[in-house]
Structure formats: structure tokens, C-alpha cells
Amino acid sequence: MTTTTAQPVLNRSDRLMLGGGGALIVLAGLAHYTDWPSGLAFVLSAAAMSVLAALVGLSVEQLGDRFGPGATGVLQSALGNLPELFICIFALRAGLVDVVRAALIGSILANLLLVLGLAFLVGGLKHGPQPLGSDRARTIVVLMGLSVIAMAIPSLTHHLHTPAAEHEKTFSLIVSIILLFLFVLSLPFALKRSPSGESGPEQHEAPRWPIALAIGMLAVAGAAAAFVSDWFVAALEPAMDSAGISQAFAGLVIVAIAGNAIENVVGIQLAAKGQSEYAFSVVLNSPIQIALVLAPLLVIISQVFGLASLTLVFSPLLVVVLVLSIVLTAMIALDGESTWLEGATLIALYAIIATAFWWG
């Protein structure tokens, strides 16, 4: 009778990641609550965020073959946006409305341009042109464009001085409720598995973790990332003051990237492994959820709980760069294939936009 040795659920690498991540989170918490030097607090919180992002990436990998790229992307994006939700709530409580507005647009731009560009660049250099799944890519891009443009309509009514501009809070609240309803309607498509063969020949490692463990790891890492992101931004504040960085740049770049660190790592990891459809789904599900869930929730929370009032009225430059970024992303993605040069173009555009907001 032949016996086989069962493969351990957690291998050596998993245990090192969990132990190191736990230690870094504890040290980052101590640095935050016991007034350690801000530079050390920043390094510790950044290291803890990186390990948490890697843990979420591993958990997503263990779920991907079971649920398909759509459901995995929705779950990944939902947990990945938790840090930014907490950061924005804390900022609204402190009255930093401009930072929150810039962070919402910055998170969408970071995913559409920086993260997607890095995924295309890394995946393209390693594997050549990568398929995105033409039908699914087209629908994701269209939904993303419609949802983000719908979020920007209150800004157009304000800057064009229409009659609705006098009812900014009420109009933003109505739009937020409609966007949340649209998100519910979009879930059946997002959770649907791709047709067989659409994503191309991709090799996946057989899952080692039970579903319960993978989901539990995702939930714990997402919750921990919420606290670590807050500590990270708090440690950055002294550095921003000394460097003279504007609130617009802080929200658009620093808070947005810190709050979306999970997607930043996971999307690039998946593209590097040749799992292009997974990477595309994870990265683009995030701006969809920011437009359909995160921004509307923050508008409602700010009005219901008496925080600094947040509306969906953004500055003209934020609206323009947002629309241009959607157009460029759609032009690149609708052919159902990505290349490294297209990724480099997206990254270059993000760098130009970020520079434009350096002075405020």
C-alpha cells in the first residue's frame, strides 16, 4: 500500500510572511502610539503595509482558481479599498475635505494609470503581449467609464453654473444612492466566471489553502491594512510639512497610493506571473468600486454622522485629468491585449499629472 505525505497548508514562506508581518504591525503600532521618531514610524508602517499587500496577494492566488477572476477581483478590490475608507473618514473628521476629494480621484488615477501601467510593463517585458479577455475587458472598461463619469456629473453642474449647482449636497446625495444601486446591479456580471478559454492558456499553482483559510487571511489582512494605512499617513504628515507638499498632492498621490497598496502589489504580481486577466480584473475593479461604492459611501457617511460635508464636486483640473485618463485606458484596453510600451505610456501620463499637482 502506497502512502503519500500531505503537503502542509502553510509552508515555510507562508509562516515567515505571517510572523514577519505580525511583528512589523506590532512595531508600527508602538511607533504610532508611543511617539517614536516620525522617520522610524514611517519606515515601519511602510514595511508592514508591504507585507500585508504580499499576504493579500497570496490569499488571492489561493482563491483565484476556485472563484474565477471576476469574483476574485471584486473581493480583492473590496478589501483593498478598506484602508482608504478609514483614512478618508479620519480626514473628514479632521475637516480635510480637499484631501479626501483629491484622494478619491487620485486612487482612480493611480489604478488606471500607475498600477495598470506597471502591470502592463512588467507582464509585457516578461511574457510579451498579454491577452485581457476581449469580451470581459470591453465590459469592464465600459462600466468603469460610465461609473466614473456619473460620479463626475455633479462637478459639471457646479462649474457650468446650472440650477442644480444650488443644491450641491442634495444632488450629491441622490447621485450617491443611484451609484450604490448601480453597483448592486453590476454584481452578477462581476461575479460571473469567464467563458472557457477566454483568458488564454494561463498556468496556476494548485491551491494549498482551504477556502475558509484564504478568505480569513484576506479579511484579517484587509482590516489590519486599514490601521496600518492610517499610521503610515500620520507618520508622513511631519515630512509633508517640512517638504512643503500641498494638500492636493498629498491626497492625489501619497494618500491614494498608501490606501491602495494592496492592489498596487497584487495586480503587478499577477501580471508578472502571466495571469493577465486576473491582473486586469483586480486593477480595474478598484476604480469601479471607488466610483460606485467608496465615494458614495463617504458622501452619505459625512452627512449622516455630521462629519465635514463631502460632495461629489471636484476641481476642474481633477475632472479633466480623470476623463482623459479613462479615454486613454479605454483606447489601450479595448483591443483585448496589452504591451509593455502601452504600460510605459500610462506610467508617463501619471507622472505628468502628479507633477501638475505638486504645487497645489
Image (cartoon, rainbow, N blue to C red):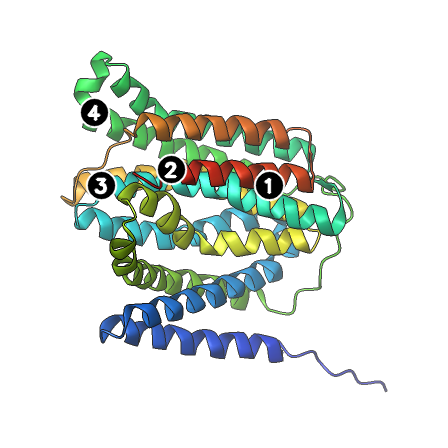
The quarter of the image holding the N terminus is bottom right
User: According to the image, label 1 marks what residue?
Assistant: 192
Residue 218: image location, x then y, percent: 48, 62
User: According to the image, label 2 marks what residue?
Assistant: 105
User: For the residue marked with disc 1, what is the amino acid?
Assistant: Lys
Sequence-first tag of 2 and 4: 2
Mark 1 or 4: in front is: 4
Q: Along the line of sight, which residue is nearer the eye, 146 or 315? A: 315
User: According to the image, label 4 marks what residue?
Assistant: 168
Examine the rendering and report whether any part of residue 177 can be seen.
yes
Residue 325: image location, x then y, percent: 49, 31
Direction from residue 238 to residue 305 in the image, left or right: left
Assess disc 4: are there few (<14), some (14-19) or many (≥20) residues with their C-alpha within 10 Å of its C-alpha.
some
Outermost residue toward the left in this view: 306
Residue 62: image location, x then y, percent: 61, 62
Sequence-first tag of 4 and 3: 3
User: According to the image, label 3 marks what residue?
Assistant: 97
Assess disc 2: are there few (<14), some (14-19) or many (≥20) residues with their C-alpha within 10 Å of its C-alpha.
many
